[in-house]
Amino acid sequence: MEFILQPWPWYVSGPLIAMVMLLLIYFGRTFGMSSNLRTLCTIGGAGKYSDFFRFDWKAQRWNLTVVLGAIIGGFVATQFLSDNSVIALSAETISDLGKFGFTSIGESLLPAEIYGWDNVLSIKGLSILIVGGFLVGFGTRYAGGCTSGHAITGLSNLQLPSLIAVIGFFIGGLIMTHFILPLIF
C-alpha cells in the first residue's frame, strides 16, 4: 500500500502513459482534454450560433468518459491515496517565488496567493484568473489543442504541428516565468 501512496517514478508512469497511447492509436482514437469543451458546448446547443459546434458529438462520448474518469481518479487520488507529503521543489524555486510574496510554496498544490478565497475575491486576483483562463482557452483553440493533446497525443503520433506547439508552450512558459510573473506579483 505504501507504494501506491507515493508519487510514481517516471519509469512506471511513463510506460503506463505510452501503453494508453498505443491502445488509443490501435483503436483509432486521439486523446485531448480541451476538445471536450467543444463537445460540451455542442451538447449545450452552441451549434445554433456557430458552425464550429455543429458536429456529431456522440462520436466523442468516449472522450467525455475520459474526463469523467480523470475527475473521479483525481478525487480518489487526493482524498484516499495521498500521503499529504509536500511537493518536491528546489530550494532556488522556493526562494525565487518567496521573493514574489508566495509563502506556502511546496506546501500546497494551489498557492493561496492565487487560489485562496481572499485573493479570488479581490480585483487583482479575479482579474488574474479571468485573463489567465481566457488566454488558456484562446491559446488552446488557436494552437488546435491543449498541452496534453499536443505533448502526449501529438508527439506520440509524431505530428510536426504538435512539436512546434510544445516548443511554443516551453517558450511561453519561460517568458511567463522570467518576464510576466515579476510584473504581476
Image: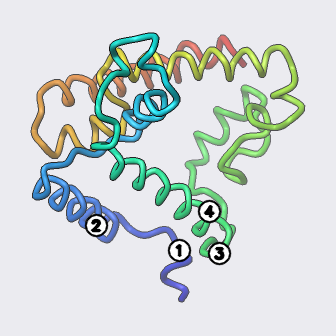
Q: Amino acid at mark 2?
A: Leu
Give whichever of 185, 84 is nearer the camera. 84
Q: Residue at x 67, y 18 (%)?
A: 130
Judging from the image, what secondary structure is the residue with disc 2 in?
helix
Q: Amino acid at mark 1?
A: Gln
Which of the two discs, 1 and 2, labels the residue nearer the N terminus? 1
What whole-number distance in Å separates the C-alpha atoms at marks 4 and 1? 16 Å
Judging from the image, what secondary structure is the residue with disc 4 in?
helix
Mark closer to the observer (1, 2): 2
Report which quarter residue 133 is drawn in: top right
Residue that mark 1 sits on: 6
Residue 16: which numbered mark, if any?
2
Q: Amino acid at mark 3?
A: Phe
Q: Amino acid at mark 4?
A: Phe
Mark closer to the observer (2, 4): 4
Residue that mark 3 sits on: 80
